[in-house]
Amino acid sequence: MQLPPSLQRALERLVATQPSAALEQAATTLSTRYREASAGNAPAINSLLEAVAYAAWRMPATYAALRAVFQRLAEAQPDFAPTRMLDIGAGSGAAIWAAAAQWPSLRRIVALERQPAIARIGEQLAADADLPPITWQRADVLALDRLPESDLVVMGYVYSEIEPAARAILLSRLWKATAGALVMVEPGTPAGHATILGARAELIKRDASILAPCPHTADCPLAAIGDWCHFAQRVARPAFQRRLKGAAAPFEDEKFAYLIAARRGAPPVNGRIVRHPITHSGRIELRICTAQGLQHITVTRSQGEAWRRARDSAWGDGWENDPPKDIGDSGAE
Ligand SMILES: C[S@@+](CC[C@H](N)C(=O)[O-])C[C@H]1O[C@@H](n2cnc3c(N)ncnc32)[C@H](O)[C@@H]1O
């Protein structure tokens, strides 16, 4: 996946406003602070320099994960055409760019962000872009009793920054504001998945339809074996980012966990591929999450149509069982 050229150019211009040594230092400090932060204890972005560093360091990856998740939502509901979007903890606006790329139907966006420095960067990046009108609201979402009703409500890499005691009430406000779909993305770590599972349980209590990744509302079979559900999106690293990170690889793989809850609909698939398919000569092994638990299936070349589907499938795709040939792995690998 590539960043939209207009976003890449806007980031390049932004990065050029700061001395590169200071930017590198700020990015390193920020990334250490993020790694050391505990749940609900988010590191502050204290200055414009740090906000630019955040955008340069993280925005390509968070954009890519959000874009991948929005594609899953569009797959699940091809007729979903949101006009109103609410982006909670918008940061530098990755979700806005990703949603605008997915849904040309968007007409107005509210970006809620409590840290003024990063909101300013988000605003600056979007200033000359071909994006729907955005209202930037500098506010703490926890201080707002009511949120504007929106077709698409997004919380990208934010929920884990909310202190655990405040999460259920926030989620109920978010769900109340959701006219269409609520999308949450978190880091693809055991903690990120646990955060998503907490939100999933709350939303199921409120009769939300879980569209993805789970093809069911039963307990998570990965969590039951001490594993965690996550996916990955490869994204090209712009030159400024390779310099900033001192990284030679022209891409990075962003691991993420996610949840799409909707007002209507049912899971569009009866299985989800939860690991990279393993291809051998003449057979492909798939690990699939289903309502009946984890299934480890082997599809052979002789299976014709199923073989073609398996060959074209990737980690994160849906899988229609017909029915699966369970070779007995319902436990940890
Ligand atoms: C890790 S950043 C993610 C930014 C953006 N959503 C993205 O995906 O790149 C989390 C953002 O959420 C914001 N945030 C955290 N708690 C918040 C709250 N209670 N109200 C508003 N914003 C909040 C932070 O200030 C920060 O900008």
Image: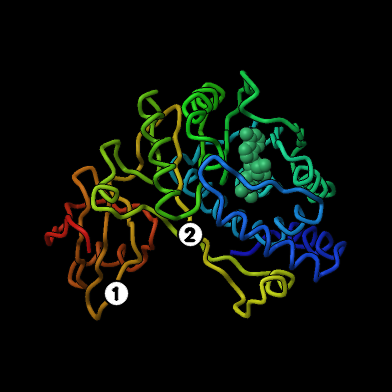
Which residue type carries mark 2?
Answer: Lys
**Residue 165 appearing in the image:** yes
Mark 1 crowdedness (10 Å alpha carbons): few <14, some 14-19, many ≥20: some
- Compare residues 214 and 38 and report the one nearer the observer: 38
Residue at 54%, 54% (x, y): give it.
65
| Residue 255 marker | 2
Query: Residue 13, how many percent across, how many down?
Result: 84, 62
Sooner in the amino-acid sequence: mark 2 or mark 1: 2
Query: Residue 137, how many percent across, how many down?
Result: 75, 31
Task: Give SS at disc 2.
Answer: strand
State which quarter of the image contains the N terminus. bottom right
Which residue type carries mark 1?
Answer: Thr
Q: Is mark 2 within 8 Å of ligand 1?
A: no
Mark 2 crowdedness (10 Å alpha carbons): few <14, some 14-19, many ≥20: some
| Residue 279 marker | 1
Q: Is residue 187 positioned above or below 200 on the image?
A: below
Q: Is residue 280 left or right of residue 268?
A: left
